[in-house]
């Protein structure tokens, strides 16, 4: 029933550059997909209490929230971290637990996704179960990291990789990729894409970024990121520049353990930081990597470093938008800090969103205790929750 549009990234330059029939077919397919999703029957959602948020004013929402609810908003986790029975559908346990821990967002991976009708019903049911609208997130970069497009159950455009898009040198190609990806994400109920990659792929031995990056030149990567975000935004999807302060000139993988960036801050300013700084004005968020930037802070990885996030990213570079950690269950964090300590350090460092701690309840209790004890101020908590609410569309 779904229209197959498996055009590779090697054709995208011709498609977008000429503005011809092929790009129109791809965008038509995305529109058709959205229509089919909206018309398809889906199981009745399991719902909890009625939505009690009746205003779009972020300040008014804050006044209605308890401290516990505010702390929960900081966490973006997988559905099974709320209820093990909810990997692919919303269960009664999910609804009950979400009422207790009204988290800010849910992130889905390939194993959560079975087919188009299941996915649309899943995201819709999660939203109906939440008193405050959820950010429903995914890593859909295009290329190697594409949870939906690489599923055999979906007939979606599959890009070879983003490096190939960058090799065309055409901003329109990156914009087209963002628009195509955003179109099908919106059709399936997603609101937030953890893309584009803003890393500059300067190390040929890099095992984690590689062709996920748009290229090896910071100016090119900066242009491509801006264009990709423009494409996402045209479909109503929020994006994310990652992985600050740059994961492109590394050999190790923070999924496994400690990884160091040994460049000086000035060297980073001359290369890795350019795609971030030049796109702050259009960025919905910045994701902070678990790399340890030894020239700035040789004690903590960037994601837990107040020197990197508050002193450098926010104060020196002037970014006042939404900041989130990379997944806190990754080896570089969990092996060395544990869930509760890492969550408290990450929030104290200046992050707004705490992504996927291995033990969510332990991390939640750790941050809540830090707030109630005064170690973290209520003003600081309100700043982050306000940023999260505004990302969701509150004013």
Image (cartoon, rainbow, N blue to C red):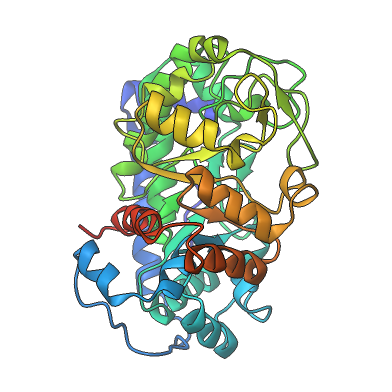
Q: Is 50 located above or below residue 238 in the figure?
A: below
- Find residue 246 and report its horizontal and vertical position in percent: 58, 25
- Find residue 48 and report its horizontal and vertical position in percent: 43, 89
| Viewport quadrant of the C terminus | bottom left
- Find residue 95 and report its horizontal and vertical position in percent: 51, 85
- Residue at the limit of the structure toward the front, as seen here: 374
Q: Is 218 located above or below residue 307 in the figure?
A: above
Q: Quadrant of residue 160?
A: top right
Whether residue 286 is visible? yes
- Find residue 159 and report its horizontal and vertical position in percent: 56, 35
The answer to whether 138 appears left or right of 13 in the picture is: right
Q: How many marks?
A: 0
Q: Is 204 located above or below residue 395 in the figure?
A: above
Q: Quadrant of residue 129?
A: bottom left
Q: Residue at x 63, y 64 (%)?
A: 363
Name the residue nearer the viewer: 41 or 322: 322
Q: Residue at x 70, y 61 (%)?
A: 358
Name the residue nearer the viewer: 227 or 200: 200
Q: Residue at x 56, y 68 (%)?
A: 369
Whether residue 6 is visible? no
The answer to whether 280 appears left or right of 251 in the picture is: left
Name the residue nearer the viewer: 27 or 231: 231
Q: Residue at x 38, y 50 (%)?
A: 183
The answer to whether 222 appears left or right of 53 in the picture is: right
């Amino acid at each position: 029933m779904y229209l197959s549009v498996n055009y590779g990234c090697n054709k995208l330059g011709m498609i977008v550059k000429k503005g011809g029939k092929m790009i129109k077919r791809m965008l038509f397919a995305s529109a058709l997909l959205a229509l089919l999703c909206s018309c398809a029957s889906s199981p009745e959602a399991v719902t909890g209490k009625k939505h009690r948020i009746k205003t779009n004013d972020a300040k008014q929402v804050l006044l209605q929230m308890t401290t516990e609810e505010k702390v929960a908003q900081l966490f973006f986790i997988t559905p099974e971290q709320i209820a093990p029975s909810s990997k692919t559908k919303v269960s009664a346990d999910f609804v009950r637990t979400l009422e207790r821990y009204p988290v800010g967002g849910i992130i889905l991976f390939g194993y959560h996704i079975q087919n188009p009708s299941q996915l649309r019903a899943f995201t819709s049911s999660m939203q109906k179960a939440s008193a405050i609208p959820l950010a429903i997130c995914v890593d859909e970069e295009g290329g190697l990291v594409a949870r939906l497009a690489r599923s055999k159950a979906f007939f979606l455009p599959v890009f070879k990789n983003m490096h190939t898009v960058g090799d065309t040198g055409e901003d329109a190609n990156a914009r087209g990729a963002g628009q195509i990806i955003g179109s099908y994400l919106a059709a399936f109920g997603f609101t937030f894409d953890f893309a584009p990659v803003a890393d500059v792929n300067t190390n040929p031995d890099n095992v984690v970024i590689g062709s996920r990056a748009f290229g090896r030149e910071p100016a090119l990567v900066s242009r491509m990121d801006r264009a990709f975000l423009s494409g996402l935004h045209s479909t109503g999807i929020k994006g994310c520049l990652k992985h600050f302060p740059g994961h492109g000139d590394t050999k190790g993988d923070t999924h496994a353990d400690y990884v160091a960036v040994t460049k000086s801050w000035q060297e980073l300013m001359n290369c890795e930081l350019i795609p971030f700084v030049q796109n702050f004005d259009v960025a919905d968020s910045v994701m902070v990597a678990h790399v340890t930037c030894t020239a700035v802070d040789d004690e903590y990885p960037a994601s837990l470093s107040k020197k990197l996030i508050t002193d450098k990213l926010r104060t020196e570079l002037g970014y006042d938008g939404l900041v989130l950690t990379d997944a806190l269950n990754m080896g570089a964090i969990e092996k060395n800090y544990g869930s509760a300590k890492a969550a408290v350090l990450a929030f104290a460092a200046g992050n707004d969103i705490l992504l996927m701690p291995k033990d969510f309840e332990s991390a939640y209790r750790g941050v809540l205790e830090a707030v109630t004890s005064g170690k973290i101020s209520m003003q600081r908590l309100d700043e982050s929750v306000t940023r999260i609410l505004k990302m969701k569309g509150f004013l």
